[in-house]
Amino acid sequence: MKAHLRKVLLLAGLLTLAGAATASAIGSCIGPLCVSVTATLQPRELPKHGNAPVSLSSVVRINSHDGSTPPTLQTLEFLFDKHGTVDTRGLPVCTLAKLEGTTPAEGRKRCADALVGRGSSKVLVSMPGKAPFTFTSPVSFFNGAPSGGNPTLIAQGYETVPAPKTLLVPIVIERISHGRYGFRARIEMPEIAGGYGAPLLAEATIGRTRMRGGKKVGYINAHCVGGRLQVYGTMRATNGDFFPATLTSPCHTPG
């Protein structure tokens, strides 16, 4: 197993399109590497027809039970329940150019109107000749310009070693038709800390409401069909490790 990790987990919030009103957790291990996900969805009561705004939160933990550094994460891919949707109509957009070179505080100030989520990440850095150490970074999620008619998120992180650097990851939320799932997001993971950073923890909450035409709408909205919402996620490492996980959240309609 490699002694360093080149990718950082910035988008844990995307795991949360199916959570629970009380936190639910899924965990799995392959060899010494273990990944756990805890997700919450608010509110739990949702309409049967139409959509209501929801707030999505998630905590992802990555560790190794033998003390070794986890292998390099290469890609994340998520399939989201077709009974949820992303609504960006009338929502301001932010661009990669506007966020380039910004600190977390500067990014949130420049693109305050496009901010749809917040979180944080914790990274283990193992550089040659230095004792391992950790650092944390705020993570922001901004509404980006549509790509091919599909909604786009821009995730912003920030590293301080070996030198200060802004990390930007665009994520296209593609519409699909695949059984229970109606949306897909694939994320190519960025290099962090010169290739020596290993993600240990990622927390995120995504959800913003606004008024449109006298009605409250959310960045993410959902309705309840069949008593549940669901998301299927996979993590793939460069050493071949593959972590699939399905999160299912109970929901109910009024009455």
Image (cartoon, rainbow, N blue to C red):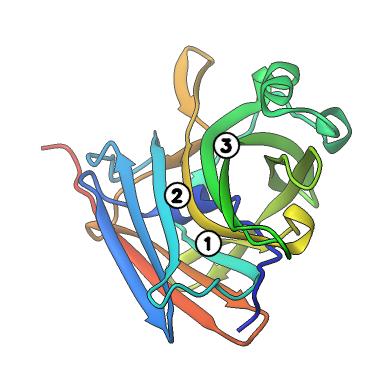
- Dot 2 and dot 1 residues touching (CB under 8 Å): yes
Q: Is residue 82 above or below residue 253?
A: below
Residue bearing mark 2: 84
Say which mark, if any, is on residue 146.
none
- What count of labels does the image hold? 3
Residue bearing mark 3: 87
The quarter holding residue 47 reads top left
Q: In screen coordinates, is 72 left or right of 95?
A: left
User: For the residues marked 2 and 1, what is the alpha-carbon distance in whole angstroms?
Assistant: 8 Å
Q: Identify residue type, mark 1.
A: Gly
Q: Earlier in the sequence, mark 2 or mark 1?
A: 2
* Element under disc 2: strand
Residue 9 visible in the shown view:
yes
* Element under disc 3: loop
Residue 83 visible in the shown view:
no
Q: Residue at x 65, y 79 (%)?
A: 2
